[in-house]
Image (cartoon, rainbow, N blue to C red):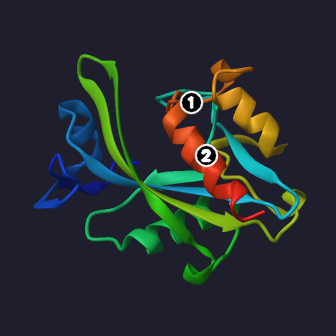
Amino acid sequence: MDELVDILDEHGKPTGKSCLKSEAHQKGLLHPTVHVWFYTGNGKVLIQQRGKTKETHPLLWDVSVAGHVASGENIALAALREVQEEIGLDISEADLEPIGTFKEVHKHAENFIDAELHHIFLAKLKAPLASLTKQESEVESLDLVPLFQFAEETWGLGNSDKYVPHGPNYYKLIVTEIKKRI
């Protein structure tokens, strides 16, 4: 879905301008997104397999929930909206633990440069995996994997080619922050 997104400067600050998401991608304009990583008390992390019709990284495993922040939308409310849309889970803002931002630029094609500032949250998964309802157009599958296995695979020690290439620094941040909470 093409929606209006706010444009950020190189430091992640709003410029006061907005445009359609497709234009931001075409021109490589930095815009905000949310990433919500769910973890369990017994040391597992929820990962999602991207839908097979996704424009970027189809069928690769990725963050539990992710999405664009609509123009003018509050970051935390965008995270809550995406959680409800992608996995059918209703959580509150108090359930979100912000752990920082991460700037990422992927040049997929000459006219498709995805420049995003991810606002990253952790949240404890309190519902069983079987109770989650995946958004068919966005999510192919959901899985809970042990944090140790996830760390090995995303840090390049194992099967790293099955994940969206956010890079080891990004994944190390996620693993480190989850480890502090379990």
Name the kind of residue labelled 1 in the image: Val
Please provide percent x and percent y for residue 99.
Answer: 50, 62
Under circle 2, the secondary element is loop
Query: Alpha-carbon distance for marks 2 and 1?
Result: 9 Å
Q: Residue sitting at 29 percent across and 46 percent down?
A: 21
The disc placed on residue 63 is 2
Q: Residue sitting at 39 percent across and 69 percent down?
A: 75
Report which quarter residue 116 is drawn in.
Answer: top left
The quarter of the picture where the C terminus appears is bottom right
User: Alpha-carbon neighbours of circle 1 within 10 Å: few (<14), some, or many (≥20)?
Assistant: some
Please provide percent x and percent y for residue 113.
Answer: 28, 29
Q: Are marks 2 and 1 in contact (CB under 8 Å)?
A: yes
Left or right, 9 with reference to 129: left
Earlier sequence position, callout 2 versus callout 1: 2
Number of numbered discs on residues: 2
User: Alpha-carbon neighbours of circle 2 within 10 Å: few (<14), some, or many (≥20)?
Assistant: many
Name the kind of residue labelled 2 in the image: Val
Please provide percent x and percent y for residue 79.
Answer: 50, 66
Report which quarter residue 90 is drawn in.
Answer: bottom right
> Which residue is tagged 1?
164
Report which quarter residue 143 is drawn in.
Answer: top right
Q: Residue sitting at 26 percent across and 64 percent down?
A: 71
